[in-house]
């Protein structure tokens, strides 16, 4: 394995986070492996864990909550830089017009998202859970779709506000983040997972009609954000969870027939709007069978790189796709090692992953999905220290 040594021991001059990520996206080796915490709603940190880390570091920052359901916290840009983070999220909150502090007290807590899905957070729970599906009124999906009105994307004033505030941070790399789930995942939320998987087989025409409703929203959303953002280099973050720990949730044939053509249409639209845009695509689990298909659709970046899932061994992914795909994630397992391992185990795992994924660039360090609320602060410190010690090129 390659020995990366300690960060900062080389003779390279200091560069900004924006430059560091840009180098990784171009499959070049910057001064150190770039770090993303909070750049998207799937590379974030639960506000409880974030507040403990900030207290430990003596850092004072107001916390915004871009994703109320997951209770993701985001500090100021100055604090991100102090933590060694190289990215910044640009986008409206996932749930608009929600008074997050007011909804974070009381039992039970209730939220309704713009699509009409209800969420509940019970006492002592860290997150919200879905408790209703607005398209379950009828047995047949086609009947439930009649009369359903999807939300409108955020208005231009909201978009201008969030883009202007974040874009002012010239030293951090901008990530334009989505505000809704993926085409397949949102279909499952609107109809219920089991019901919708049945719809896919019994009523594919209505399933595709629903996919088009969601695609139309996404097209309007990205049209608005990209019009305001302009033509500078950016990562555009999208997602659709197709995988479980052991396999794909639906057949690759269904994914290729229904979802990938629509994703390709959207990605083509985005790259026509901004030719410097790189497409970041999040899909949890065992997605190895469709990685080549995702690349063919225009995906430039894969996340979260869940290396504990079937077929997702890091060395094989790097070998087979490392020239065509930037790996944004896979930094450390968030199901076992980060929450339940010792600080020493965290350090060892971070070093192991860096040894495999960092050579040749094309790697941005992020944890496998969000850092959860129960992660000990000692393990967060171990992760950041390991990146400092072993992440230098």
Image: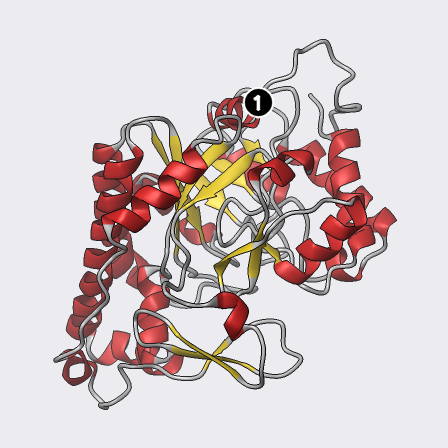
Residue nearest the viewer, comparing 50 with 2: 50
Colouring chosen for the image of the structure: secondary structure
Image side of residue 340 versus residue 51, left or right: right
Q: Please indicate, yes or no, whether residue 369 appears anywhere in the rendered image.
A: no
- The N terminus: image quadrant: top right
Residue nearest the viewer, comparing 233 with 321: 233
- The C terminus: image quadrant: top right
Q: Position of residue 153 (x, y in %)?
A: 25, 57
Q: Position of residue 274 (x, y in %)?
A: 27, 31
Q: Label 1, on which residue?
A: 16
Up-down relation of residue 31 to residue 220 (above or below): above
Q: Give the class, few, some or many, for how many residues have Cα within 10 Å of label 1's Cα (few <14, many ≥20).
A: some
Q: Which residue corresponds to the image point at 21% horizontal and 81% vertical from the top-left?
A: 141
Residue nearest the viewer, comparing 82 with 22: 82
Q: Please indicate, yes or no, whether residue 305 appears anywhere in the rendered image.
A: yes
Up-down relation of residue 144 to residue 283 (above or below): below
Image side of residue 236 versus residue 264, left or right: right
């Amino acid at each position: 394995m390659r020995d990366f040594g300690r960060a900062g021991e080389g003779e390279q001059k200091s560069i900004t986070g924006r430059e560091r990520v840009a180098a990784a996206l171009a499959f070049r080796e910057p001064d150190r492996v770039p770090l993303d915490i909070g750049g998207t709603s799937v590379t974030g940190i639960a506000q409880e864990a974030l507040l403990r880390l900030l207290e430990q570091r003596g850092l004072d920052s107001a916390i915004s909550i871009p994703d109320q359901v997951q209770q993701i916290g985001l500090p100021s840009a100055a604090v991100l830089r102090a933590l060694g983070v190289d990215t910044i999220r640009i986008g409206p909150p996932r749930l608009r017009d929600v008074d997050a502090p007011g909804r974070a007290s009381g039992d039970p807590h209730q939220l309704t998202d713009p699509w009409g899905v209800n969420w509940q957070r019970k006492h002592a729970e860290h997150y919200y859970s879905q408790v209703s599906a607005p398209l379950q009124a009828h047995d047949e999906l086609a009947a439930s779709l009649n009369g359903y009105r999807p939300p409108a994307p955020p208005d231009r004033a909201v978009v201008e506000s969030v883009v202007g505030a974040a874009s002012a941070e010239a030293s951090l790399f901008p990530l334009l983040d989505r505000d809704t789930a993926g085409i397949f995942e949102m279909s499952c939320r609107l109809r219920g997972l089991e019901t919708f998987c049945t719809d896919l087989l019994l009523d594919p025409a209505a399933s595709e009609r629903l996919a088009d409703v969601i695609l139309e929203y996404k097209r309007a959303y990205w049209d608005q954000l990209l019009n305001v953002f302009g033509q500078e280099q950016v990562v555009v973050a999208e997602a659709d969870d197709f995988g479980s720990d052991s396999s794909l949730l639906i057949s690759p044939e269904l994914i290729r027939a229904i979802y990938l053509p629509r994703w390709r249409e959207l990605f083509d639209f985005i790259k026509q709007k901004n030719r410097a845009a790189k497409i970041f695509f999040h899909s949890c689990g065992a997605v190895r069978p469709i990685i080549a298909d995702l690349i063919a659709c225009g995906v430039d970046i894969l996340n979260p790189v869940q290396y504990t899932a079937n077929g997702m061994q890091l060395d094989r992914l790097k070998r087979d796709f490392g020239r065509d795909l930037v790996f944004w994630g896979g930094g450390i397992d968030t199901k076992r090692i980060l929450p339940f391992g010792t600080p020493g185990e965290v350090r060892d795992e971070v070093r192991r992953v860096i040894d495999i994924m960092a050579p040749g660039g094309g790697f941005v360090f992020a944890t496998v999905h969000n850092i959860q609320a129960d992660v000990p602060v000692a393990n967060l410190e171990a992760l950041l220290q390991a990146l400092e010690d072993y992440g230098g090129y």
